[in-house]
Image (cartoon, coloured by chain):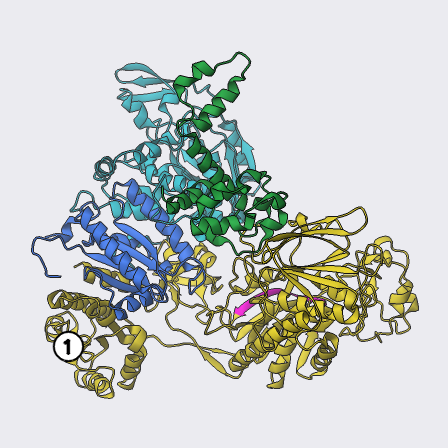
Chain colours: A cyan, B yellow, C blue, D green
Amino acid sequence: MQELVNRAKELLANGTVQRVLGWKAGDMAYNPEPSYFETEADLSDFVYDAFCGANLSKYMIEASKKEGKTLVFLKPCDSYSFNQLLKEHRVDREKAYIIGVGCKGKLDIETIRKQGVKGIEEISGASMDDACDTLKIKTIYGDKEVSYQSAMLERCHVCKGKDHVVYDEVIGESRDTVDGERFSEVQRIESMTPEEKFLFFQKELSKCIRCNACRNVCPACSCRKCVFDSNKFDSAQKANVDSFEEKMFHIIRAFHVAGRCTDCGECSRVCPQGIPLHLFNRKFIKDINEFYGDYTAGEDIDAEAPLTHFEFTDREPNEERG
Amino acid sequence: MQRIGVFVCHCGSNIAATVDVKKVVEVVSKEPGVCHAEDYPYMCSEAGQMKILEAVKEKNLSGVVVCSCSPRMHEATFRKAAERAGLNPYMVEIANIREHCSWIHKDMEEATEKAVILARAAIAKVNLNTPLKAGESRVTKRALVIGGGIAGIQTALDIADAGYEVDIVEKTPSIGGRMSQLDKTFPTLDCSACILTPKMVEAAAHEKINIYTYSEVDKVTGFVGDFTVDIRKKARSVNSDKCTGCGVCQEKCPSKKSLNEFNRGLNTRSAIYTPFAQAIPNVPVIDRDACIKFKTGKCGVCEKVCQAGAIDYNQQDEIITEKYGAIVVATGFDTIKLDNYDEYAYNQSKDVITSLELERIMNAAGPTKGHLERLSDGKAPKEMVFIQCVGSRCSDTRGKSYCSKICCMYTAKHAMLIRDKYPDVNVTVFYIDVRTPGKNFDEFYRRAVEEYGVNYVKGQVGKVAPLPNGKLLVQGSDLLDNKQILKEADMVVLATAIEPEASVRKIATMLTASIDTNNFLTEAHPKLRPVESPTAGVFLSGVCQGPKDIPETVAQAGAAAVKAIGLLAKDKLTTNPCTAKPDELLCNGCSQCANVCPYGAITYENKEVNDHGIRETRRVAQVNSALCQGCGACTVTCPSGAMDLQGFSNRQIIAEVDAICR
Amino acid sequence: MPLNENEFRPKIVAFCCNWCSYAGADLAGSSRLSYPADVKIIKVPCSCRVNPMFILRAFEKGADGVILCGCHPGDCHYSTGNYYARRRMTLLFSMLDYLGIEKGRTRVEWVSAAEGVKFSQTMNEFVEKIRSLGENVRLGDLRCKN
Amino acid sequence: MSHRDYSGKIKEISGVNPYKCMKCGKCSATCPSFNEMDIKPHQFVSYVLNGDIEALAESKSLWKCLSCFACVERCPRDVKPGKLIDAARQIVVRERGGDYLSADEIPELLDEELPQQLLVSAFRRYKR
């Protein structure tokens, strides 16, 4: 981490960049938050550890409008989001100095809590310099231990890869964290009966409080004004009446990011209700891969996006799924 | 809220027999925004239209709904009526209660209920209609013809004769195209050059025609009436203004090993060359891949012998940018490659040739000076076999599914010419069907059989095998005799399928003109608009649209010219007002809409916007309403709803949905 | 067909492209090829104009089935519109299936201007299918129900 | 089975749509066994289309076809007469076979010298 801070200071000092976009320590050890750093002194708050799951690429939309370059730290998966934004002309490559940072898998405090660890005060073993095998957790109920791998975010178990697709330089080592099948959850749902599927999603989506956290964090959901906030479709939403009415929002949201979603998993990470929102996006990714050939959004900015492209021989919509 | 008048047509008994029109009037008159509702036996009649006029004036209506037959029948009629009443014509919506209701339902209660719902949907839509105005765009009075074969020449001549400037772009060093390679033409057996060269000269001499040979279209932007085209004039290495066309350079050129494209590679040419004697312009080009000067830096013979001082080794490609109102594609055809047809031994024997190669052999300027001889040993053939449908009418992946259309006739021509000039040569034609529709065509084919003794065998050839004695063993079917024929031939001529010239793909992409799976350009309507591309301002001439012979090509070339002239004769074009329109404040600038636009109507601009007090420069979508045809593909691609379609807006369609589902 | 009080009468929205399917529906009409009055047609310029929002909106407001008709692939008046529509609808339908919405409530059919018979047959089949599926509950918005 | 059914069976086994034939005769032109055949390759198609499977089944051609598949290779319409005759042959073989080989018979047939493979493939082909 110190290496990142040193390099940031250097780049600020020599005028390459005017500000730094990174993470700063939060009020608890497990909730660092995205932040700008304008001066060397500001950087004393800088942090980069296993809880820095936040994807900073979306902030580059606004940073691109600012004077001068912004130094941004991107994890391998974040760099896909940045690239996708670049493809859509939302960020300015000239305005960004990208340091690709290593990643050993990011942690999920909720997953730790689910393992029965409550009253957390301090967590060690989550720094990039650590072995990242075991987390030693100090709680008000005494010390606990949890394996690092068991505390990882879902997305890290099915990581796209630890190579950055866009960067100016790369600092820090990464570690392969894949130990799951990316589409296994989607497949599990696909194999359910319609009734089971419906009940599953009704149960999950009824939790939605329309706080819009998923929309606000999503690097693909970056419209200046969301259709659900404008009168363009007579679709500005009112308060919930029906417990399942949020389906329209989530289906359309998934549809709007289909072919653009890099599966960064931020939607699920930030959902205060713990709805596995990535299951929508991942369903579309799986379908696109199956129907139109493998496609990874953000990987290649010159690739034809699946929904703005077609083949004469594409499958028919009514076709029974195999 | 609009002030809407609803008019329910009886259409005699067509509607009124099944739909209770009085009931419809009664129910819809209570709909929000409706200030007037009435029924009338024939709304489309003059008296019916007057009802609209009167009501608009009396009740100060701002919108009109007509419940009648399909909008495909009378939408235009009622729009005009509204216009006469002083309303914007796009404030009219039709509820189709005839084709979509009274004609398909028998139960009156059911049909009436549905008619009411359809009327409600139309009322809900009109409530959100806004007056639309057809735009105007100017027309540049100049046409571009891509391709300088007989199709392109004829189109250019016809357009130029009507008084408009025309540029021809031809990628080879001379105009003339495939027709200049032909020896004789069916069914009259005129010498091809004798009828073509006067046209070439006429085009070259025409004051309204400007010819760019050895040139290609590099880039096309713009739209109907206002295209901007970059033409790449490839470096000829010869100054056209100075060259006198004396030909000494070609004689003296020491590099003579290049395959002669004009003679289909059957002999060779020099590195500096004009493709054929009557070339226009009669100015050679240097083939830089073959030229010793360009390869080694040494030589320069042509420069030394050129008394006019026309050789210019330093010439560069030149880009010419020109504006056009109309573009005619006349890119022509080539024969398919025969690599997939090993059974015909084309790649194994020099004596198996294509029909186009035979044209060159028969031609006095060809590789054999017009003598029919075997290319392997120069001997005169005694036994010749023609095979029809080579690569045509194949539904497998090796060939083309279509009939190449010209082969039956040119084969009859070849057979006849050979029997006439060399009566001792036996000619056998293996055919599947002989297709000779066309004026004097069947008579021509029958003459080949009856007067010239050409042996037509119904059946395809399965195999051609070169024999050690230099002959070719042809194994074919005689289906009428139910026999298998084995014939030793001296030469085999393959009626090879034709396909669009390969460069047409690139050109179609530049023009956003659609192309079918065989690379033929698609016509706007296969029957009613056969010489227009669906892309406005682009016209089709000759084989680029589909296989055709010379008379058909010339006829289509003229038709394309007339269509182009019709466009150029206009000073201004009115455009469809139902076009896409972006809301700049909502636009993300992501370019997704531009990626799906089939017309290239969407561009992006960095534009200063004022978003509720925030002034900033944003990348926003711009729609060229002259180009946009109003399909709406962009509107669905746009996640923020910034892109909307006038006349079919998101809110209008949703209002219709709501009215129907209510 | 007399209206039976107890019979389930589905609400069906059919989006038809202006150039092929709407004309196909007109031909069905002028050929007097009957199909149930439950089907109401909305004219759109091209199948690619149909936003998934429209389809979900229809269901939310109480539709029991939605069908989208366009020109046959390759015949689109705008040359490529129906290809985009095909991909969009393929994904949307797959998603609806994934959410447990009954298969068959949504459908895409390519109907040319000459296919009046096909239009009528398609609508008859579709209405039959929706009748067999019954009322749409899963995609509806309860606020829109009585 | 009626003749029509046989026609359907042949289409099913061969996977060929005989209606695609444009009667060009390239199959007969390419056939090395043409002279040995009473019904010529290009005629297979019309026999199948006309449902005259009996004649085809009794023809010499059925056994003269070498299955060299030159006609299949070269047919411009994907009609593949070689596959048609092969299908007809299979029908005849199956028909004749009836219960040609039942599992119970196998132990008796076992012979030390007989390759196992042969028996297995024979059983596959000739079992009911």
Residue carrying label 1: B35
Q: Position of residue A320 (x, y in %)?
A: 34, 43
- The residue at the point 63 percent across, 78 percent down is B154
- The residue at the point 40 percent across, 20 percent down is D103
Give the left or right position of residue B117, taking residue A303 as reference: left
Mark 1 residue element: strand
Give the left or right position of residue C58, taking residue B318 as reference: left
Where B474 sits versus A34, above or below? below
Q: Which corner quadrant of the image does residue A188 belong to?
A: top left
- The residue at the point 27 percent across, 61 percent down is C120
Which residue is nearer to you in this view: D61 or B169? Answer: D61
Give the left or right position of residue B130, taking residue B523 as reference: left
Q: Main secondary structure of the magenta part?
A: strand
Which residue is nearer to you in this view: A76 or C138? Answer: C138
Q: The disc numbered 1 marks a residue on which chain?
A: B
Q: Which corner quadrant of the image does residue B266 belong to?
A: bottom right
Q: Residue furthest top?
A: D112
Image quadrant in which the C terminus of chain B is located: bottom left
**Are there few (<14), some (14-19), or many (20+) residues within 10 Å of tag 1?**
some
Q: Is residue D43 magenta?
A: no
Amino acid beneath label 1? Cys
Q: Position of residue B559 (x, y in %)?
A: 55, 78
Give the left or right position of residue C76, taking residue D82 as reference: left
Q: Position of residue A28 (x, y in %)?
A: 33, 28
Which residue is nearer to you in this view: B342 or B88? Answer: B342
One can see residue B332 in this view? no
Image quadrant in which the N terminus of chain B is located: bottom left
Where A181 sits versus B271, above or below? above
Q: Position of residue A27 (x, y in %)?
A: 33, 30
Q: Find the magenta span and give its range.
A: B212-222
